[in-house]
Image (tube, rainbow, N blue to C red):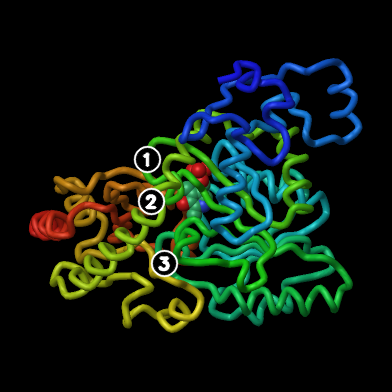
């Protein structure tokens, strides 16, 4: 192998081909913070906007770039920006498109971090967030004003797995854009479904974000987030990312790339396991309610069939006996793991009032539909017999 071609000179890595040499099958990790210029003209070329010159890894890194290209393809988007976490992806995208004095309209049942970012951080920048009732999206026509720059939605929602009609949100935003002669960005958090089960660009959404910590990463070993959109939107997001600094590092990107090779296999199995588990638990005497979009009893089952390609790996159950019973069950599992987060190959369980919705007021809990007896289950890829046996023995403890 020509050692020069393996060097990190801009000539070896810029342009279309990441692998100009006969070399590794797996993605090389460009574990570098900075890049050697061929000569000082490279710095001038970069300053003049030549994007093929690599200068610094907060701006761009070939390992990170390859993952971005792959995820953009998976989500059916033009381009993607990878971040150090899902929250970095969300905050960077939001701050790219919404400024002081402008407004966001959002669905209310959000990931806890997003909800708190909207509630506690954005007001300090004079950005207000209005919430629309997801079961009455006509409210958007009233809530969207001249000041609205972003409509944000999450579906399925955490932890009740309620759905929001994506096509209807987009249609109402388009109507408002005409009315106010403004551009309003629609952004969806697609983490719970993941792109195997939901492809929001088909419904006209502008920006998709996913916490790649969850299904894309899938092994509970990395933090990552991604924003996918058109090239012009991603260019803007990346400019903000340079200054907010939540960029991805090459080693994480390598691990994520590795995970993506089994993404489809994992999530197909999780869908299947979740469906079987949800059906079984629905008949269990100690379980009061099962929330899973694939069940006929789910209030948004028809919408799930319309806008999702699969029902996902998340199941929420409500056990009889409130939080005490939920604690008993969660502390009794042998296969499932009592831990926060979701989307990994191992089944994780958590109690929303102790985790995502901890320290929320009664009114907030009510608004989010969260009750003390809820257990959120992120179903893994284990053998379904083992999972079922584990749930049966744990539920016996109450
Ligand atoms: C975990 C999660 C996030 C935040 O992602 P991090 O990678 O933890 O920063 C955002 N949205 C949803 C739905 C999530 O589950």
Label 2: state its secondary structure.
loop
Q: Quadrant of the C terminus?
A: bottom left
Quick check: is the Cβ at mark 2 less than 8 Å away from ligand 1?
yes
Residue at image mark 2: 343
Q: Which residue is drawn at 62% across and 67% down?
A: 201
The picture places residue 229, in percent across and down from the top left corner, at: 68, 56
Label ID, residue 198: none
Per the image, the residue denoted by label 1 is 220
Q: Which of marks 1 and 3 is nearer the N terminus?
A: 3
Residue 102: image x %, image y %?
A: 80, 57
Give the labeled residue for mark 3.
161
Above or below, 326 relative to 305: above
- For marks 2 and 1, the one nearer the N-term is 1
Helix, strand or loop status at disc 1: loop
Mark-to-mark CA distance, 3 and 2: 14 Å
Q: Where is residue 363 in the image (x, y as percent from the top left)?
A: 48, 62
Nearest to viewer (mark 1 / mark 3): 1
């Amino acid at each position: 192998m020509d050692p020069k071609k393996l060097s990190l000179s801009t000539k070896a890595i810029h342009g279309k081909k990441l692998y100009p040499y006969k070399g590794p099958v797996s993605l090389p990790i460009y574990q570098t913070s900075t890049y050697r210029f061929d000569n000082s003209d490279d710095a001038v070329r970069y300053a003049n906007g030549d994007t093929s010159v690599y200068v610094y890894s907060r701006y761009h890194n070939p390992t990170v770039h390859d993952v971005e290209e792959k995820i953009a393809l998976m989500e059916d988007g033009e381009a993607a920006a990878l971040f150090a976490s899902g929250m970095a992806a969300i905050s960077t995208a939001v701050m790219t498109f919404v400024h002081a004095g402008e407004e966001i309209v959002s669905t209310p049942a959000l990931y806890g971090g997003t909800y708190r970012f909207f509630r506690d951080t954005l007001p300090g920048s004079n950005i207000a967030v209005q919430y629309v009732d997801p079961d009455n999206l006509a409210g958007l026509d009233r809530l969207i004003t001249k000041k609205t720059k972003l409509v944000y939605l999450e579906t399925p929602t955490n932890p009740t797995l309620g759905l929001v009609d994506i096509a209807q949100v987009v249609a109402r935003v388009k109507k408002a854009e005409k009315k106010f002669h403004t551009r309003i960005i629609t952004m969806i958090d697609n983490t719970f479904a993941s792109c195997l089960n939901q492809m929001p660009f088909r419904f006209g959404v502008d920006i998709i974000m996913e916490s790649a910590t969850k299904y894309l990463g899938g092994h509970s070993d990395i933090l990552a987030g991604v924003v996918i959109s058109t090239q012009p939107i991603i260019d803007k997001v990346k400019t903000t990312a340079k200054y907010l600094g939540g960029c991805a590092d090459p080693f994480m990107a390598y691990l994520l790339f590795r995970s993506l090779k089994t993404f489809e296999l994992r999530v197909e199995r999780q869908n299947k396991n979740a469906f079987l588990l949800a059906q079984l638990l629905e008949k269990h005497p100690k379980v009061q309610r099962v929330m899973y979009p694939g069940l006929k009893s789910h209030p948004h089952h028809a919408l799930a069939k319309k806008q999702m390609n699969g029902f996902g790996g998340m199941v929420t159950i409500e056990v009889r006996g409130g939080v005490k019973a939920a604690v008993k069950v969660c502390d009794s599992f042998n296969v499932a793991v009592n831990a926060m987060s979701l989307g990994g190959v191992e089944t994780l369980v958590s109690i929303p009032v102790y985790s995502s919705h901890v320290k929320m007021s009664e009114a907030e809990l009510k608004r989010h539909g969260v009750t003390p007896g809820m257990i959120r289950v992120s179903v893994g890829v284990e053998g379904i017999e083992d999972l079922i046996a584990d749930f049966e023995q744990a539920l016996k403890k109450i």
